[in-house]
Image (spheres, grey):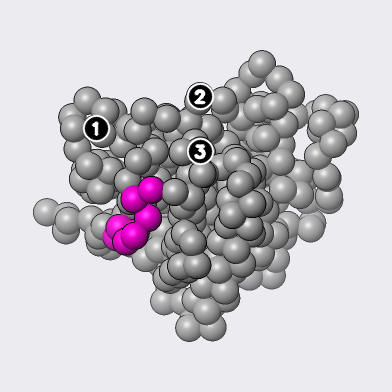
Amino acid sequence: MAEEPVIYTTEGAATGPLLVIHGGAGKRRHPYPEERDEQARAAIRRALDAGMAVLDAGGAAVDAVVAAVHVMEDDPTFNAGRGAALTSEGRVELDACLVRGDGSTGAVTGVTTVRNPIDAARAVMDETRHVLFADPRKAQLDEWGVEQVENDYFVTQRRLDQLHELQSLPDGGYDRPGHGTIGVVARDATGAICAGTSTGGVSNQMPGRVGDSPICGAGTYANQATVAVSCTGTGETFIREVAGYQVHARVLWAGQTPGEAVARVLAAVEDRGGDGGIICVPAHGEGVVGRNACAQMDWGYAFGDTRVTHS
Ligand code: ASP
């Protein structure tokens, strides 16, 4: 029988601007050195500051999410943007999704040259009538003004070493998600909420594999009636559980608190053999961070002058 998921709640942020960030959750194949965890906390702190600068200036939740995601994507500590997990071919294929509480959605999957995939997701949201693009053409990305780089920019020695280690194992290490997907959820001064997630997927994944992160309702979801949600972990199980939408549905129709809803969804994910974590910010009330008891998680939250980070 799986242990109860672990739930943390922000304290003192029931109303007003609030930002919650995760830097990935899952079982770790090796314990991380303390130095790595310090880097993760420092990066989350910088991302919290970047997002709060937007919210403190009266900016929109969506802009705060994008600002914070940028910091996390640029930091090689995490499995998003530079430093992302590698496919079995040693390349990077990136996914990102942005969902606002009013239903506006933009997502990309399998992008290989977009420096900050969240910018491409934002362009899909703002510039098109569509929701999800698979590997948009270079000319299209140029037209959207999205910065592009060579695929080599994303590849780090740490990820190459990890890939070689996984490929030497009989199962390809596939039961261990490439820890470090990032996600941000925010509420602004008007009460509007937004969620964003960015990832390189799972280390040693088959080229073309898509996880939960870019799928609205699975790894990323927001609904102004309830919550904004970003997930991390074994993507296949989060898709099968329609995890983000399920948190919303439990709050809306089952009358559960966001903390209860997150715990029940994580339990359902574990029942399917997955693990990971979920962050959520409700339109009204305290933010929530949850993880399976077997998983480690990097996370943080900010409101007013308060900054909390954990790894
Ligand atoms: N959920 C991501 C995916 O399956 C991986 C992760 O969060 O570590 O692509």
Helix, strand or loop at label 1? It is helix
- Reading the image, the residue beneath label 3 is 190
Helix, strand or loop at label 2? It is loop
Whether residue 168 is visible here, answered yes or no, is: no
Which is more foreground, mark 3 or mark 2? 3
Spatial CA distance of label 3 from label 1 is 24 Å
Circle 2 packing at 10 Å, graded few (<14), some (14-19), many (20+), is: few
| Residue numbers of the magenta segment | 8-15
- Reading the image, the residue beneath label 2 is 103
Spatial CA distance of label 3 from label 2 is 16 Å
Q: Nearer the viewer, residue 79 or 252?
A: 252
Residue at x-position 39% and y-position 38%: 283
Whether residue 71 is visible here, answered yes or no, is: yes
Estimate the x, y position of residue 249 in percent, counting from the top left: 28, 28
Main SS class of the magenta portion in the image: loop
When asked about the image quadrant of residue 197, the answer is top right
Amino acid type, callout 1 = Arg
N-term mark: 1 or 2? 2
When asked about the image quadrant of residue 85, the answer is bottom right
N-term mark: 3 or 1? 3
User: Which quadrant of the figure contains the N terminus?
Assistant: bottom left
Helix, strand or loop at label 3? It is loop
The answer to whether 289 appears left or right of 271 in the picture is right
Estimate the x, y position of residue 75 in percent, counting from the top left: 66, 64
N-term mark: 3 or 2? 2
**Vertical placement of 3 versus 279: above or below?**
below
